[in-house]
């Protein structure tokens, strides 16, 4: 794995020296657990690229295209204080309905999982804490599986009797999640979660970085509450101040996320947050630096 990581970092630095400097700094943070955490994921990704007749160079180009888009969005965000899109239709027209954009964007997001420090920190927190819930999880639901990272590790951690269900509105995401998990234990549903209904409730629900993609995040969290067993657990993640081409709902700070969680009938069992840049909290607030927030939730006791 280290050979591939070194190549990725060196190539990014050669193509975009400023961003390469940041990525090299991230690499100094990663500990021994980093390779254990991502070696299997990266191996699967390289295999996936090969089956698609693509290379790591292609993936790196996709990643840098995503970074370029994010830089443009960030300039506009800092000027206006708003995301460039505010409706699903806008994002659909700009991103989701354009296969070429979706492809490079998804590859860019995959690369970010093992290049961005705050992504690694949050994912590590998840896989460290999930075993604490394993004995109570007979059914697992994931909303928006994306590239399948959380799903694939959950399959490894939870016992063989656990049933797995994925609901995702994106055919691209469903395909990637299937490729990365390669398991017949997962029942995939290509549909809007609001159209998803089932007689039985779930013991555990994972939803990573989805709230910022919808116009009404409270409605989405309330839907999760309806799908959850009375003593079940939800794990969610979402960022503050994270302008990208497909983000709709702006959380200005963690306090706003916490308030939304409580409004949806949840209480926070444990939580974590990680800044995307190495700055002080004061500078983060002043310059609207993105914070990646995650939390394990329970239904509010009546």
Image (tube, helix red, strand yellow):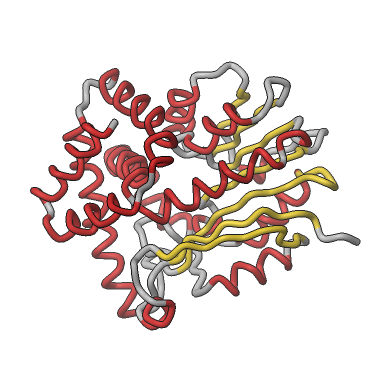
Residue at the (49%, 46%) spot, across then down:
123
Q: Is residue 50 left or right of residue 32?
A: left
- Percent coordinates x, y for residue 270 in the rendering: 67, 58
User: Image quadrant of residue 258?
Assistant: bottom right
The image quadrant where one finds the N terminus is top left
- Percent coordinates x, y for residue 139 in the rendering: 73, 32
Furthest residue in direction front, as rendered = 32
- Percent coordinates x, y for residue 12 in the rendering: 16, 47
Q: Is residue 134 above or below residue 288?
A: above
Most foreground residue, 247 or 236: 236
- Percent coordinates x, y for residue 238 in the rendering: 52, 58
Most foreground residue, 183 or 216: 183
Most foreground residue, 36 or 186: 36
Residue at the (43%, 59%) spot, across then down:
247
Q: Is residue 64 left or right of residue 231?
A: left
Furthest residue in direction left, as rendered = 14
Q: Is residue 221 above or below residue 203?
A: below
Residue at the (21%, 57%) spot, across then down:
68
């Amino acid at each position: 794995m280290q050979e591939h990581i070194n190549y990725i970092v060196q190539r990014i630095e050669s193509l975009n020296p400023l961003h390469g400097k940041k990525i090299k700094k991230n690499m100094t943070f990663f500990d021994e657990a980093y390779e254990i955490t991502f070696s299997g994921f990266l191996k699967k990704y390289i295999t996936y690229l090969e089956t698609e007749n693509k290379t790591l160079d292609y993936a790196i180009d996709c990643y840098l295209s995503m970074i370029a888009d994010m830089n443009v969005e960030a300039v506009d965000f800092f000027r206006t204080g708003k995301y460039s899109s505010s409706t699903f239709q806008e994002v659909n027209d700009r991103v989701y309905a354009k296969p070429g954009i979706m492809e490079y964007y998804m590859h860019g997001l995959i690369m970010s999982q093992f290049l961005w420090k705050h992504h690694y920190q949050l994912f590590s927190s998840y896989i460290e804490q999930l075993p604490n819930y394993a004995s109570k999880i007979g059914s697992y639901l994931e909303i928006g599986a994306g590239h399948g990272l959380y799903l694939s590790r959950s399959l490894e951690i939870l016992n063989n009797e656990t049933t797995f269900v994925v609901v995702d509105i994106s055919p691209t995401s469903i395909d990637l999640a299937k490729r990365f998990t390669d398991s017949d234990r997962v029942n995939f549903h290509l549909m809007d979660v609001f159209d998803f209904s089932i007689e039985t409730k779930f013991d555990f629900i994972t939803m990573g970085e989805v709230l910022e993609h919808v116009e009404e995040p409270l409605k989405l969290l309330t839907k999760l509450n309806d799908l959850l067993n009375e003593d079940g657990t939800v794990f969610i993640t979402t960022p503050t101040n994270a302008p990208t081409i497909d983000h709709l709902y702006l959380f200005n700070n963690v306090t706003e996320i916490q308030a939304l969680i409580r409004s949806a009938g949840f209480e926070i069992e444990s939580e974590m947050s990680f800044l995307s840049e190495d700055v002080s909290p004061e500078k983060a607030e002043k310059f609207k630096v993105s914070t990646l927030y995650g939390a394990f939730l329970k239904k509010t006791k009546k």
